[in-house]
Protein backbone atom coordinates (compact mmCIF):
# COMPACT_ATOMS: atom_id res chain seq x y z
CA UNK A 1 0.00 0.00 0.00
CA UNK A 2 1.31 3.45 -0.93
CA UNK A 3 2.18 5.96 1.76
CA UNK A 4 1.44 9.66 1.43
CA UNK A 5 3.45 12.41 3.07
CA UNK A 6 0.98 15.11 4.14
CA UNK A 7 1.97 18.43 5.71
CA UNK A 8 -0.70 20.98 6.67
CA UNK A 9 0.09 24.68 6.41
CA UNK A 10 -2.31 26.85 8.39
CA UNK A 11 -3.07 30.42 7.41
CA UNK A 12 -1.51 31.87 10.57
CA UNK A 13 1.57 30.18 12.02
CA UNK A 14 1.25 32.19 15.22
CA UNK A 15 -2.27 31.08 16.11
CA UNK A 16 -3.32 27.66 17.31
CA UNK A 17 -4.89 25.59 14.52
CA UNK A 18 -8.16 25.51 16.52
CA UNK A 19 -8.35 29.31 16.81
CA UNK A 20 -11.48 30.78 15.17
CA UNK A 21 -9.31 33.16 13.11
CA UNK A 22 -7.10 30.41 11.75
CA UNK A 23 -7.82 28.04 8.90
CA UNK A 24 -6.16 25.53 6.64
CA UNK A 25 -4.26 27.38 3.94
CA UNK A 26 -2.90 24.42 2.02
CA UNK A 27 -1.99 20.75 2.19
CA UNK A 28 1.32 19.53 0.86
CA UNK A 29 0.81 15.99 -0.48
CA UNK A 30 3.44 13.62 -1.82
CA UNK A 31 2.92 9.96 -2.57
CA UNK A 32 6.26 8.31 -1.88
CA UNK A 33 8.05 7.84 -5.20
CA UNK A 34 5.90 10.46 -6.97
CA UNK A 35 5.96 14.22 -7.47
CA UNK A 36 4.61 16.46 -4.72
CA UNK A 37 1.49 18.57 -5.11
CA UNK A 38 -0.13 21.46 -3.27
CA UNK A 39 -3.85 21.43 -2.43
CA UNK A 40 -5.06 24.96 -1.73
CA UNK A 41 -7.91 25.97 0.56
CA UNK A 42 -7.14 29.56 1.53
CA UNK A 43 -4.38 31.17 -0.51
CA UNK A 44 -4.20 34.30 -2.68
CA UNK A 45 -2.26 32.56 -5.48
CA UNK A 46 -5.03 30.06 -6.10
CA UNK A 47 -8.51 30.87 -4.91
CA UNK A 48 -10.32 27.63 -5.76
CA UNK A 49 -10.77 25.15 -2.93
CA UNK A 50 -9.37 21.67 -3.46
CA UNK A 51 -10.48 18.58 -1.56
CA UNK A 52 -8.62 15.74 0.12
CA UNK A 53 -11.22 12.98 -0.15
CA UNK A 54 -8.70 10.68 -1.86
CA UNK A 55 -6.56 10.75 1.33
CA UNK A 56 -9.22 9.59 3.77
CA UNK A 57 -8.38 5.88 3.52
CA UNK A 58 -4.65 6.24 2.78
CA UNK A 59 -1.62 5.65 4.99
CA UNK A 60 -0.37 9.11 5.92
CA UNK A 61 3.03 10.21 7.23
CA UNK A 62 3.28 13.64 8.85
CA UNK A 63 5.39 15.55 11.38
CA UNK A 64 2.52 16.57 13.70
CA UNK A 65 -0.36 14.15 13.79
CA UNK A 66 -2.43 16.24 16.21
CA UNK A 67 -2.44 19.24 13.87
CA UNK A 68 -3.47 17.06 10.93
CA UNK A 69 -6.32 15.52 12.92
CA UNK A 70 -7.71 19.01 13.56
CA UNK A 71 -8.47 19.12 9.83
CA UNK A 72 -10.04 15.68 9.51
CA UNK A 73 -9.97 12.45 11.60
CA UNK A 74 -7.86 10.47 9.13
CA UNK A 75 -7.81 6.78 10.05
CA UNK A 76 -4.18 5.81 9.56
CA UNK A 77 -1.67 8.54 10.37
CA UNK A 78 1.91 8.01 11.53
CA UNK A 79 3.58 10.84 13.43
CA UNK A 80 7.14 10.81 12.07
CA UNK A 81 8.46 13.07 14.82
CA UNK A 82 7.26 10.43 17.25
CA UNK A 83 8.91 7.66 15.22
CA UNK A 84 12.18 9.61 15.17
CA UNK A 85 11.75 10.01 18.94
CA UNK A 86 11.38 6.24 19.29
CA UNK A 87 14.61 5.67 17.37
CA UNK A 88 16.75 8.59 18.58
CA UNK A 89 14.98 9.68 21.82
CA UNK A 90 14.52 13.18 20.42
CA UNK A 91 12.38 14.87 17.76
CA UNK A 92 13.60 15.73 14.27
CA UNK A 93 15.93 18.68 14.93
CA UNK A 94 16.97 19.75 11.43
CA UNK A 95 16.42 23.38 10.48
CA UNK A 96 13.86 23.34 7.68
CA UNK A 97 13.53 27.11 7.41
CA UNK A 98 13.18 28.69 3.98
CA UNK A 99 14.98 32.03 3.57
CA UNK A 100 12.19 33.64 1.57
CA UNK A 101 9.54 32.54 4.06
CA UNK A 102 11.63 33.68 7.04
CA UNK A 103 12.13 37.07 5.37
CA UNK A 104 8.38 37.51 4.89
CA UNK A 105 7.66 36.39 8.47
CA UNK A 106 10.16 38.95 9.77
CA UNK A 107 9.01 41.82 7.55
CA UNK A 108 5.27 41.26 8.02
CA UNK A 109 5.19 39.76 11.52
CA UNK A 110 2.05 41.75 12.38
CA UNK A 111 0.17 40.58 9.31
CA UNK A 112 -2.59 38.05 10.02
CA UNK A 113 -2.77 34.87 7.94
CA UNK A 114 0.65 35.48 6.45
CA UNK A 115 0.89 31.99 4.95
CA UNK A 116 -1.89 32.91 2.52
CA UNK A 117 0.46 35.39 0.82
CA UNK A 118 3.70 33.38 0.93
CA UNK A 119 4.18 32.12 -2.67
CA UNK A 120 3.02 28.53 -3.16
CA UNK A 121 6.39 27.63 -4.69
CA UNK A 122 8.15 28.65 -1.47
CA UNK A 123 5.74 26.58 0.63
CA UNK A 124 6.41 23.63 -1.68
CA UNK A 125 10.20 24.02 -1.40
CA UNK A 126 9.92 24.21 2.39
CA UNK A 127 7.76 21.07 2.54
CA UNK A 128 9.94 19.20 0.04
CA UNK A 129 12.84 19.48 2.51
CA UNK A 130 10.70 18.15 5.35
CA UNK A 131 9.39 15.41 3.07
CA UNK A 132 12.93 14.11 2.46
CA UNK A 133 13.51 13.77 6.19
CA UNK A 134 10.14 12.08 6.71
CA UNK A 135 11.03 9.53 4.04
CA UNK A 136 14.44 8.86 5.62
CA UNK A 137 12.96 8.33 9.10
CA UNK A 138 10.24 6.04 7.69
CA UNK A 139 12.91 3.90 5.97
CA UNK A 140 14.47 3.28 9.40
CA UNK A 141 11.27 2.24 11.17
CA UNK A 142 12.60 -1.31 11.63
CA UNK A 143 15.31 0.03 13.94
CA UNK A 144 12.79 0.07 16.76
CA UNK A 145 9.88 -2.04 17.98
CA UNK A 146 7.42 -0.82 15.36
CA UNK A 147 4.39 -2.50 16.93
CA UNK A 148 5.05 -0.66 20.19
CA UNK A 149 5.49 2.58 18.27
CA UNK A 150 2.18 2.03 16.45
CA UNK A 151 0.36 1.60 19.76
CA UNK A 152 2.00 4.69 21.25
CA UNK A 153 1.38 6.66 18.06
CA UNK A 154 -2.31 5.84 18.27
CA UNK A 155 -2.99 6.26 21.98
CA UNK A 156 -0.64 9.08 23.03
CA UNK A 157 -1.70 11.38 20.19
CA UNK A 158 -5.38 10.56 20.71
CA UNK A 159 -5.27 11.29 24.44
CA UNK A 160 -3.62 14.72 24.24
CA UNK A 161 -5.46 15.72 21.08
CA UNK A 162 -8.71 15.05 22.94
CA UNK A 163 -7.70 17.45 25.75
CA UNK A 164 -6.53 20.19 23.41
CA UNK A 165 -9.80 20.17 21.48
CA UNK A 166 -11.76 21.20 24.60
CA UNK A 167 -9.82 24.42 25.05
CA UNK A 168 -9.40 26.31 28.33
CA UNK A 169 -11.97 28.97 29.18
CA UNK A 170 -10.37 32.22 30.39
CA UNK A 171 -11.27 35.76 31.35
CA UNK A 172 -10.82 38.33 28.57
CA UNK A 173 -8.26 40.05 30.79
CA UNK A 174 -6.02 36.94 30.86
CA UNK A 175 -2.92 38.61 29.42
CA UNK A 176 -2.54 41.56 27.07
CA UNK A 177 0.52 39.94 25.48
CA UNK A 178 -1.43 36.81 24.58
CA UNK A 179 -4.82 38.43 23.89
CA UNK A 180 -4.48 37.42 20.24
CA UNK A 181 -4.44 33.74 21.29
CA UNK A 182 -7.91 33.90 22.90
CA UNK A 183 -10.62 32.47 20.66
CA UNK A 184 -14.26 32.58 21.79
CA UNK A 185 -13.00 33.08 25.37
CA UNK A 186 -10.71 30.06 25.09
CA UNK A 187 -7.01 29.36 24.94
CA UNK A 188 -5.78 26.20 23.25
CA UNK A 189 -2.89 24.20 24.63
CA UNK A 190 -0.33 22.11 22.74
CA UNK A 191 1.21 19.03 24.39
CA UNK A 192 4.69 18.39 23.02
CA UNK A 193 5.42 14.69 23.46
CA UNK A 194 8.98 14.43 22.25
CA UNK A 195 10.91 15.41 25.39
CA UNK A 196 14.04 13.85 26.86
CA UNK A 197 12.22 12.61 29.96
CA UNK A 198 9.09 11.36 28.18
CA UNK A 199 7.00 13.86 30.15
CA UNK A 200 5.18 16.21 27.73
CA UNK A 201 5.64 19.96 27.84
CA UNK A 202 2.62 22.19 27.22
CA UNK A 203 3.31 25.58 25.66
CA UNK A 204 1.64 27.67 23.00
CA UNK A 205 1.61 31.34 22.11
CA UNK A 206 4.02 32.24 24.89
CA UNK A 207 1.91 30.53 27.57
CA UNK A 208 3.35 27.70 29.64
CA UNK A 209 0.19 25.84 30.64
CA UNK A 210 2.17 23.49 32.87
CA UNK A 211 3.39 26.35 35.07
CA UNK A 212 0.71 29.03 35.29
CA UNK A 213 1.32 31.54 38.09
CA UNK A 214 -1.37 32.35 40.67
CA UNK A 215 -2.58 35.42 38.77
CA UNK A 216 -2.99 33.50 35.50
CA UNK A 217 -4.72 30.65 37.34
CA UNK A 218 -7.28 33.07 38.78
CA UNK A 219 -8.27 34.00 35.20
CA UNK A 220 -8.90 30.38 34.18
CA UNK A 221 -12.66 29.98 34.69
CA UNK A 222 -15.26 27.30 33.92
CA UNK A 223 -17.23 27.27 30.71
CA UNK A 224 -19.72 25.09 32.57
CA UNK A 225 -20.25 25.65 36.32
CA UNK A 226 -17.11 24.77 38.31
CA UNK A 227 -13.48 23.81 37.91
CA UNK A 228 -12.55 20.59 39.69
CA UNK A 229 -8.95 19.49 40.12
CA UNK A 230 -7.91 15.95 41.01
CA UNK A 231 -4.36 15.82 42.35
CA UNK A 232 -2.56 12.53 42.97
CA UNK A 233 -1.03 11.91 46.39
CA UNK A 234 2.69 11.03 46.12
CA UNK A 235 2.21 9.95 42.50
CA UNK A 236 5.82 9.06 41.69
CA UNK A 237 6.25 7.25 44.98
CA UNK A 238 3.16 5.14 44.33
CA UNK A 239 4.20 4.47 40.72
CA UNK A 240 7.52 3.18 41.98
CA UNK A 241 5.81 1.12 44.67
CA UNK A 242 3.73 -0.52 41.95
CA UNK A 243 6.87 -1.34 39.95
CA UNK A 244 8.67 -2.90 42.96
CA UNK A 245 5.57 -4.55 44.43
CA UNK A 246 5.66 -2.56 47.66
CA UNK A 247 2.34 -2.21 49.47
CA UNK A 248 1.60 1.06 51.24
CA UNK A 249 -0.86 1.02 54.13
CA UNK A 250 -4.01 3.12 53.88
CA UNK A 251 -3.41 6.86 53.99
CA UNK A 252 -0.69 9.10 52.64
CA UNK A 253 2.43 7.47 51.23
CA UNK A 254 4.48 10.46 52.36
CA UNK A 255 3.22 10.08 55.92
CA UNK A 256 4.17 6.40 55.85
CA UNK A 257 7.73 7.06 54.65
CA UNK A 258 8.18 10.01 57.01
CA UNK A 259 7.47 7.72 59.96
CA UNK A 260 10.20 5.38 58.74
CA UNK A 261 12.64 8.32 58.75
CA UNK A 262 11.30 9.53 62.14
CA UNK A 263 10.73 13.06 60.79
CA UNK A 264 7.68 15.21 60.03
CA UNK A 265 5.82 15.04 56.70
CA UNK A 266 7.44 18.03 54.99
CA UNK A 267 10.95 16.96 55.89
CA UNK A 268 10.06 13.40 54.90
CA UNK A 269 8.91 14.47 51.41
CA UNK A 270 12.21 16.24 50.81
CA UNK A 271 14.17 13.20 51.96
CA UNK A 272 12.13 10.83 49.78
CA UNK A 273 12.79 12.73 46.54
CA UNK A 274 16.41 13.35 47.49
CA UNK A 275 16.90 9.60 47.87
CA UNK A 276 14.94 8.67 44.75
CA UNK A 277 16.70 10.99 42.33
CA UNK A 278 19.90 11.98 44.12
CA UNK A 279 21.16 8.66 45.45
CA UNK A 280 20.16 6.36 48.31
CA UNK A 281 22.54 6.17 51.30
CA UNK A 282 23.57 2.66 52.33
CA UNK A 283 22.05 2.94 55.81
CA UNK A 284 18.68 3.90 54.28
CA UNK A 285 18.81 0.88 51.96
CA UNK A 286 19.49 -1.40 54.91
CA UNK A 287 16.83 0.00 57.25
CA UNK A 288 14.05 0.99 54.85
CA UNK A 289 12.28 -1.83 52.95
CA UNK A 290 10.86 0.55 50.33
CA UNK A 291 14.29 1.91 49.41
CA UNK A 292 15.86 -1.52 49.55
CA UNK A 293 13.52 -2.56 46.73
CA UNK A 294 14.04 0.75 44.88
CA UNK A 295 17.79 0.21 44.98
CA UNK A 296 17.36 -3.27 43.51
CA UNK A 297 15.29 -1.84 40.64
CA UNK A 298 17.92 0.85 40.04
CA UNK A 299 20.62 -1.81 39.77
CA UNK A 300 18.54 -3.96 37.41
CA UNK A 301 17.77 -1.05 35.08
CA UNK A 302 21.36 0.20 35.07
CA UNK A 303 22.75 -3.25 34.35
CA UNK A 304 20.29 -3.85 31.49
CA UNK A 305 20.99 -0.38 30.07
CA UNK A 306 24.74 -1.00 29.95
CA UNK A 307 24.66 -4.64 28.85
CA UNK A 308 21.98 -4.42 26.14
CA UNK A 309 22.30 -0.75 25.20
CA UNK A 310 18.74 0.16 26.18
CA UNK A 311 15.84 -0.23 28.54
CA UNK A 312 12.17 -0.23 27.55
CA UNK A 313 9.50 1.77 29.33
CA UNK A 314 7.03 -0.52 31.14
CA UNK A 315 3.74 0.45 29.44
CA UNK A 316 4.42 1.12 25.75
CA UNK A 317 7.91 -0.44 25.57
CA UNK A 318 9.45 2.76 24.24
CA UNK A 319 13.23 2.21 24.10
CA UNK A 320 15.61 4.52 25.90
CA UNK A 321 18.89 3.91 24.05
CA UNK A 322 22.30 4.25 25.66
CA UNK A 323 23.75 5.57 22.38
CA UNK A 324 21.40 8.55 22.63
CA UNK A 325 22.33 9.36 26.25
CA UNK A 326 26.13 9.32 26.42
CA UNK A 327 26.47 11.09 29.79
CA UNK A 328 23.47 9.69 31.65
CA UNK A 329 23.89 8.50 35.24
CA UNK A 330 22.10 5.71 37.07
CA UNK A 331 19.81 8.09 38.97
CA UNK A 332 19.08 10.20 35.90
CA UNK A 333 18.16 7.08 33.95
CA UNK A 334 15.80 6.12 36.77
CA UNK A 335 14.28 9.61 36.68
CA UNK A 336 13.64 9.31 32.92
CA UNK A 337 12.18 5.84 33.41
CA UNK A 338 9.75 6.98 36.12
CA UNK A 339 8.66 10.13 34.26
CA UNK A 340 8.03 8.05 31.16
CA UNK A 341 6.06 5.56 33.29
CA UNK A 342 4.02 8.45 34.73
CA UNK A 343 3.17 9.75 31.26
CA UNK A 344 2.40 6.39 29.72
CA UNK A 345 0.16 5.28 32.56
CA UNK A 346 -1.64 8.61 32.42
CA UNK A 347 -2.24 8.19 28.68
CA UNK A 348 -4.20 5.03 29.48
CA UNK A 349 -6.04 6.90 32.24
CA UNK A 350 -6.88 9.86 29.98
CA UNK A 351 -8.33 7.55 27.33
CA UNK A 352 -10.56 5.81 29.90
CA UNK A 353 -11.55 9.15 31.41
CA UNK A 354 -12.43 10.67 28.03
CA UNK A 355 -14.55 7.67 27.11
CA UNK A 356 -16.55 8.23 30.27
CA UNK A 357 -16.77 12.03 29.88
CA UNK A 358 -17.92 11.69 26.28
CA UNK A 359 -21.41 10.94 27.66
CA UNK A 360 -21.37 13.99 29.94
CA UNK A 361 -21.25 17.76 29.52
CA UNK A 362 -18.11 18.03 31.66
CA UNK A 363 -14.69 18.19 29.98
CA UNK A 364 -11.08 17.40 30.81
CA UNK A 365 -9.31 20.67 29.92
CA UNK A 366 -5.82 20.42 31.40
CA UNK A 367 -3.34 17.70 32.35
CA UNK A 368 -0.43 18.58 34.67
CA UNK A 369 1.51 15.29 35.20
CA UNK A 370 0.01 14.38 38.57
CA UNK A 371 -3.20 16.42 38.29
CA UNK A 372 -6.25 16.69 36.04
CA UNK A 373 -8.47 19.76 35.67
CA UNK A 374 -12.14 19.23 34.84
CA UNK A 375 -14.57 21.88 33.59
CA UNK A 376 -17.53 20.43 35.49
CA UNK A 377 -21.21 20.81 34.58
CA UNK A 378 -23.40 20.68 37.67
CA UNK A 379 -26.10 18.80 35.76
CA UNK A 380 -23.74 15.81 35.54
CA UNK A 381 -24.10 15.35 39.29
CA UNK A 382 -21.88 14.12 42.10
CA UNK A 383 -21.93 10.64 40.56
CA UNK A 384 -19.74 11.98 37.75
CA UNK A 385 -17.21 13.42 40.20
CA UNK A 386 -17.09 10.08 42.03
CA UNK A 387 -16.66 8.12 38.80
CA UNK A 388 -13.76 10.36 37.75
CA UNK A 389 -12.20 9.72 41.16
CA UNK A 390 -12.70 5.95 40.72
CA UNK A 391 -11.01 5.97 37.30
CA UNK A 392 -8.03 7.97 38.58
CA UNK A 393 -7.58 5.89 41.72
CA UNK A 394 -7.34 2.49 40.09
CA UNK A 395 -4.34 0.38 41.11
CA UNK A 396 -4.11 1.80 44.66
CA UNK A 397 -3.59 5.46 43.75
CA UNK A 398 -5.05 8.27 45.86
CA UNK A 399 -6.28 11.72 44.85
CA UNK A 400 -7.11 14.98 46.60
CA UNK A 401 -9.91 16.98 45.03
CA UNK A 402 -10.61 20.73 44.92
CA UNK A 403 -13.47 22.72 43.42
CA UNK A 404 -13.92 26.41 42.65
CA UNK A 405 -15.08 29.18 40.34
CA UNK A 406 -11.54 29.79 39.11
CA UNK A 407 -8.33 27.79 38.98
CA UNK A 408 -6.67 29.75 41.80
CA UNK A 409 -9.39 29.85 44.46
CA UNK A 410 -10.48 26.26 45.04
CA UNK A 411 -11.70 24.46 48.15
CA UNK A 412 -11.06 20.85 49.08
CA UNK A 413 -13.93 18.38 48.54
CA UNK A 414 -11.99 15.15 48.96
CA UNK A 415 -13.95 14.01 52.01
CA UNK A 416 -17.30 14.73 50.33
CA UNK A 417 -16.42 12.41 47.46
CA UNK A 418 -15.33 9.65 49.83
CA UNK A 419 -18.80 9.22 51.36
Image (spheres, rainbow, N blue to C red):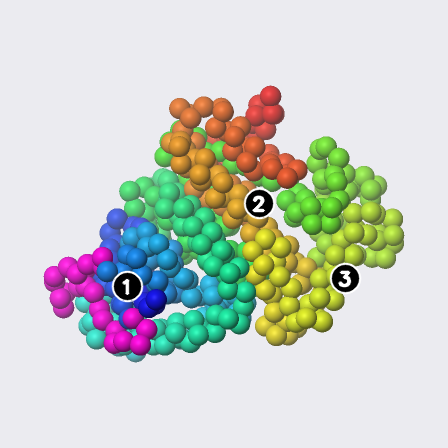
Magenta stretch, residue numbers: 31-53
Q: Earlier in the sequence, mark 2 or mark 3?
A: 3
Camera-side mark, 3 or 1 = 3
State which quarter of the image contains the N terminus: bottom left
The first of marks 1 and 2 along the sequence is 1
Which residue is identified by label 3?
299
The answer to whether residue 398 is visible is yes
Q: Quadrant of residue 337?
A: bottom right
Residue shown at the point (19%, 72%) measured from the top left: 119
> Secondary structure beneath disc 1?
strand
From mark 1 to mark 2, how far is it between C-alphas?
34 Å
Q: Secondary structure at mark 2?
A: loop
Residue 239 vertical placement versus 317 (above, below) = above
In the picture, the disc for residue 9 is 1
Picture quarter with the C terminus: top right
| Marks 2 and 3 in Cβ contact (< 8 Å) | no
Left or right of residue 352: residue 395: right
Asked whether, in this view, residue 153 is left or right of residue 198, the answer is: left
Look at the magenta stretch and give its main secondary structure.
loop
Relative image position of residue 88 (x, y in whole percent): 53, 71
Report the Cα–Cα distance between label 3 and label 1. Answer: 47 Å
Label drawn at residue 370: 2
Amino acid sequence: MSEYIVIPIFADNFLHPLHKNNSLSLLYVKEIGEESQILTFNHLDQLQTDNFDFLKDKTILTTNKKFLLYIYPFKKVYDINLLHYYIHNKPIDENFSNNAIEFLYGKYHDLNNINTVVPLLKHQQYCDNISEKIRDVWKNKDKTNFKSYEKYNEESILSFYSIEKSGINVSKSFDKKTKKQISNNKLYSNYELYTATGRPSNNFGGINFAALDKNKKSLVIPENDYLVEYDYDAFHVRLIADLIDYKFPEGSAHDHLSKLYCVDREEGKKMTFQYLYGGIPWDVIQLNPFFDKVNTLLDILWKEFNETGKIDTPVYKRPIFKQNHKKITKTKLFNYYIQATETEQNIKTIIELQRYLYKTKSNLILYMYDAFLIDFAEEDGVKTLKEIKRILEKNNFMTKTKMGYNYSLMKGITNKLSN
